[in-house]
């Protein structure tokens, strides 16, 4: 009968409702009884502490007997001293040892000072950060002494409360081109990670990674950036404008406000067509001169007199088939 009562008094110390987004969980009973078992699952550490002092840390997964596997390794708490036959007053904290990955995003646009815009450049950003627990003493001292559990969301709230200021600081420092911040995203991210790591140090956590995935500008500014990028890809802007206007007129997308406007558009189109035709005639004339020069020297001309394309050295033009020599 006495053995049965003893087993009834014993308990199992385990984190049986393990949540992926929970950083630590405190075992609700603070009295460890004789004959109890400790169960540690993969990705968990178990910490025994008393009055804020860590007595023992157990990291290897498995099942442990309190009497033989735990008590002898506690630093100051001993079963005999505390009359372990009736129980031992000690707290057990389970730690989630994984590295957490958290998505973040600015809630409001951040105005970055820039000479181009008097009111600053409003941008939003988003990305991810990674963290894990690395100092159990600080964790117990600053957080677990007041909380039964701690979630990833709690860390995210703490991080985002200072993130806007850090983004402004490091974008201003490392953003060489305010309209192409992605080019310096690595330097910006590294600076923010270092600052956040110092911010979380006292809580027993470390920031193992920080990444800015994208910077987002207001639509009107993004449209200008896209337009500037497309223009930079065109070598002959004048020719580009002529072609665009001609295509617009031929497709009916470019028209005036009435017959006078349509006539003006037609005249403009005819004028540009004439200029392009003159350009073509000029090229043919140059090709003819090259041919004559080549014939005088007894050589194949450099340009076809018929189509104006550059020749490849044969007797016939590879483009139009015109005989060259």
Image (cartoon, rainbow, N blue to C red):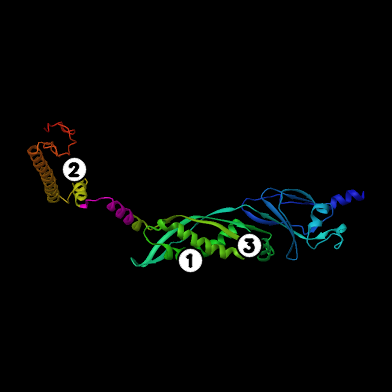
Q: Are marks 3 and 1 in contact (CB under 8 Å)?
A: no
Can you tell which of label 3 and label 1 is closer to the viewer? 3
Q: Quadrant of the C terminus?
A: top left
Describe residue 46's horizontal placement relative to residue 228 as left or right.
Answer: right
Where is residue 157 drawn, in percent x and y? 56, 61
Residue 106 visible within the image:
no
Q: Main secondary structure of the magenta part?
A: helix
What segment carries the magenta color?
223-237
How far apart are labels 1 and 2 at the CA level? 53 Å
Q: Residue at x 66, y 64 (%)?
A: 138
Q: Are marks 2 and 3 in contact (CB under 8 Å)?
A: no
Q: Which of the two discs, 2 and 3, labels the residue nearer the N terminus?
A: 3
Task: Residue under label 2, please give it.
Answer: 250
Q: Which of the two discs, 3 and 1, labels the residue nearer the N terminus?
A: 1
Task: Residue under label 1, please give it.
Answer: 165
Can you tell which of label 2 and label 3 is closer to the viewer? 3
Instruction: Determine the residue located farthest toward the front in the rendered image.
Output: 297
Q: Are marks 1 and 2 in contact (CB under 8 Å)?
A: no
Where is residue 6 drawn, in percent x and y? 87, 51
Where is residue 98 drawn, in percent x and y? 62, 52
Hey, which quadrant is residue 27 in on the image?
bottom right
Describe residue 1's horizontal placement relative to residue 113 as left or right.
Answer: right
Determine crowd level at label 1: few under 14, some 14-19, many 20+ residues with C-alpha closer than 10 A. few
Describe residue 197's horizontal placement relative to residue 27 as left or right.
Answer: left
Describe residue 21's horizontal placement relative to residue 115 as left or right.
Answer: right
Check residue 204 in the rendering and tell me which mark sits there, or answer none.
Answer: 3
How far apart are labels 3 and 1 at the CA level? 23 Å
Can you tell which of label 1 and label 2 is closer to the viewer? 1
Please say if 202 is above or below 286: below
Determine crowd level at label 3: few under 14, some 14-19, many 20+ residues with C-alpha closer than 10 A. some
SS class, disc 2: helix
């Amino acid at each position: 009968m006495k053995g049965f009562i003893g087993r009834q008094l014993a308990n199992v110390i385990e984190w049986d409702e393990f949540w992926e987004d929970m950083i630590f969980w405190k075992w609700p009973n603070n009295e460890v009884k004789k004959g109890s078992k400790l169960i540690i699952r993969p990705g968990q550490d178990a910490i025994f502490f008393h009055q804020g002092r860590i007595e023992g840390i157990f990291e290897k997964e498995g099942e442990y007997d309190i009497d033989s596997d735990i008590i002898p390794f506690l630093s100051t708490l001993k079963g005999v001293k505390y009359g372990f036959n009736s129980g031992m007053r000690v707290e057990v904290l389970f730690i989630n040892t994984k590295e957490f990955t958290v998505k973040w995003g600015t809630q409001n646009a951040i105005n970055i000072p820039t000479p181009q815009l008097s009111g600053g450049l409003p941008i939003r950003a988003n990305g991810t950060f990674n963290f894990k627990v690395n100092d159990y003493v600080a964790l117990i001292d600053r957080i677990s002494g007041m909380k039964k559990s701690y979630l990833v969301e709690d860390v995210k709230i703490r991080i985002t409360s200072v993130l806007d200021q850090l983004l402004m600081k490091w974008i201003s420092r490392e953003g060489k081109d305010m309209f192409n911040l992605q080019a310096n995203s690595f330097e910006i991210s590294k600076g923010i990670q270092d600052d956040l790591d110092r911010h979380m140090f006292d809580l027993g956590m470390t920031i193992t990674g920080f990444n800015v995935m994208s910077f987002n500008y207001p639509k009107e500014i993004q449209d200008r950036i896209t337009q500037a990028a497309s223009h930079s890809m065109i070598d002959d802007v004048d020719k580009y404008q002529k072609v665009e206007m001609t295509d617009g007129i031929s497709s009916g997308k470019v028209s005036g406000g009435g017959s006078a406007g349509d006539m003006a558009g037609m005249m403009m189109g005819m004028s540009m067509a004439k200029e392009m035709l003159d350009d073509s005639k000029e090229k043919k004339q140059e090709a003819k001169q090259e041919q004559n020069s080549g014939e005088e020297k007894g050589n194949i001309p450099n340009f076809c007199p018929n189509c104006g394309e550059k020749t490849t050295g044969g007797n016939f033009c590879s483009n139009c088939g015109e005989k060259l020599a």
